[in-house]
Image: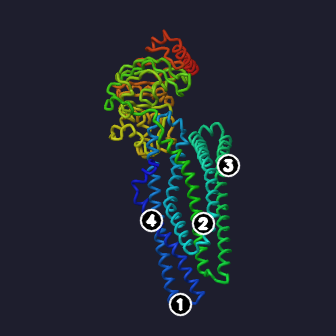
Amino acid sequence: MKRWLSYAKPYVAYFILGPLCMIIEVAGEVIMPVFLGMIINGGRDGTLTPAKSAGIAGLMILTAVIMMAGGVGGAYFGAKASVNYGNDIRRDVYKKVQKFSFANIDKFTTGSLVTRLTNDVTQIQNFVNMLLRMCLRSPGMLIGATIMAVSLRPKLSIVFAVTVPLMLICLLLVIRTAFPRFAKMQEKVDKLNNTVQENVSNVRVVKSFVREEYEVEKFKEANRDLKETGLSAQRIIILNGPIMTLFMNITIALVVWIGSQLVMGNENSMPVGDLSQFVTYVNQILMSLMMLTFLFMSTSRAMASGKRIAEVLDEKEDISDAGCALPDMKVTRGEIEFKNISFRYFKNSHDCVLENIDLTIPAGSTVGIIGSTGCGKTTLVSLIPRLYDADGGEVLVDGVNVRDYSLKNLRDGVGMVLQKNILFSGSIEDNLRWGNEDATDEEIAAAASAAQADGFIRSFSGGYGAQLEQGGVNVSGGQKQRLCIARALLKKPKILILDDSTSAVDTATEAKIREQFRTTLSGSTKIIIAQRISSVMDADMIVVMNDGKITGVGSHESLLDSNAEYREIYTSQMEGKDTAAEKEGK
């Protein structure tokens, strides 16, 4: 409760004024039956004069206007409080997610995090809005109407002692049944979001393999699961309404039956106006109980959503600045050393992705890493900026353990161009400024030119102001790679990591980009992961990896002589080129 109440503190005025306004409306509702009873009784016994009738009517109109003001005020302040409350929770959950490591995100899945940021927060926001409008209105009406009813006819009020406890027992049973069903429904929303996100993100693959029907069936299954789980939860709410209405009608019927006996009795001990007033209060009491029922139902769903949001907020970041010994330290040279590194993606797994890695990369050098798919190349370089943390051993940058740097300073010193090139919706210039938001137009153009991107950028209508669609789908794969390289170059990092980032670029353009690396980033350490051996042949040092281990380190010539695996890669790729050249000559 401390957590959730803390979000209400900045808007405490709204949280107070909203319920107070609803109390004004409740007071009017409790007073209004009194005026009605006076009119009925006065009309029956002949004491209601035109002047008195007009006076009572005027009071009723004034009360209605005050009630309207209270209702509008309560709705307004309730909306202000709940919207701001939901906004702040969503902001904190998003900030928390931004601190998550890859392992944290994998634990929840992307679709689940989207659901928690949107649907779950909305459930809490709606609950707060309902709570502010009902928390004093329902109890206030219940207490006020009960006092008025009991003071009017104490003996007739005994009916409540039978029906109200039964209603409360039914309400308790409904809430206990509903809570786990709402929690399960939110899990099904996660599954549906994951399905949609996966399909939309990879729509090109789906279409190229003609898997639309399969994906439609997959969505139908997830959608059907959500529908059935949702109906299971809604059945409780649907059942709750008729049960409460049944008790309401039974109570009103008993009151009317007993009251009519008093009205029609010989002693005429109860005026018709009093009976009408009493029935109105009975209706208000039961309606307030109905409103409390719906409030409790909303509470059960909000509790399920709140638990899911709390799981995100309470999640311990797998990688953080905790234990950072040198928060002000920055990467100045770019020397890298791996000391007896081992790593597993799943902590309980016995299979190591990296095992006993020892490697030193001198500052300012160009290093190529080559090896079979899945041998751990990307994982190894991901340890440098702490996208993952090693299970064993140390990663040192400029002689300092990467855990002793602040994440900001460490990652500021490392530029990465990943295998999957990501661009964001917005202009080309906006995307390049991710590397340096304060870069001048000249610096942006220079970085693009070094990445061999300036030419095609200027060919676009709008040039650097040309708009990219989400994910950069309106540029080719090679153009996307060059834009990502330009973005990294603009950062001017001391360590630049290129993870198979020129695979969609022709060899001539790739050679020009590598040449620019030697001049533009002459003082930076360049690590090039590649599948093409031509991409790393002229590197100062080449690292050969296989099955999570380093099998060879050296220059191109030395590895050809000493490393069978490197020689096999070279022979297979070069023979392919020679054969193609022979065919072209013929």
Quarter of the image where one finds residue 298: bottom right
Nearer the observer, 281 or 531: 281
Residue 577 x, y percent position in the rendering: 54, 20
At label 3, the amino acid type is: Glu
Check disc 1 and report its element: helix, strand or loop.
Answer: loop
Residue 480 x, y percent position in the rendering: 48, 36
Check disc 3 and report its element: helix, strand or loop.
Answer: helix
Check disc 2: other Cα within 10 Å, few if <14, some if 14-19, many if 20+. many
Quarter of the image where one finds residue 485: top left
The residue carrying mark 4 is: 20
The residue carrying mark 1 is: 49
Q: Earlier in the sequence, mark 2 or mark 4?
A: 4
Q: Earlier in the sequence, mark 1 or mark 4?
A: 4
Check disc 1: other Cα within 10 Å, few if <14, some if 14-19, many if 20+. few
- The answer to whether 433 is drawn above or below residue 149 in the figure is above
User: Can residue 356 be seen from the camera position used here?
Assistant: yes
Q: CA distance from mark 3 to mark 4?
A: 40 Å
Check disc 2 and report its element: helix, strand or loop.
Answer: helix
Question: Which quadrant of the figure contains the C terminus?
Answer: top right
The residue carrying mark 2 is: 286
Q: CA distance from mark 1 to mark 2?
A: 34 Å
- The answer to whether 269 is drawn above or below residue 460 in the figure is below
The answer to whether the residues at label 2 and label 3 have Cβ atoms under 8 Å apart is: no
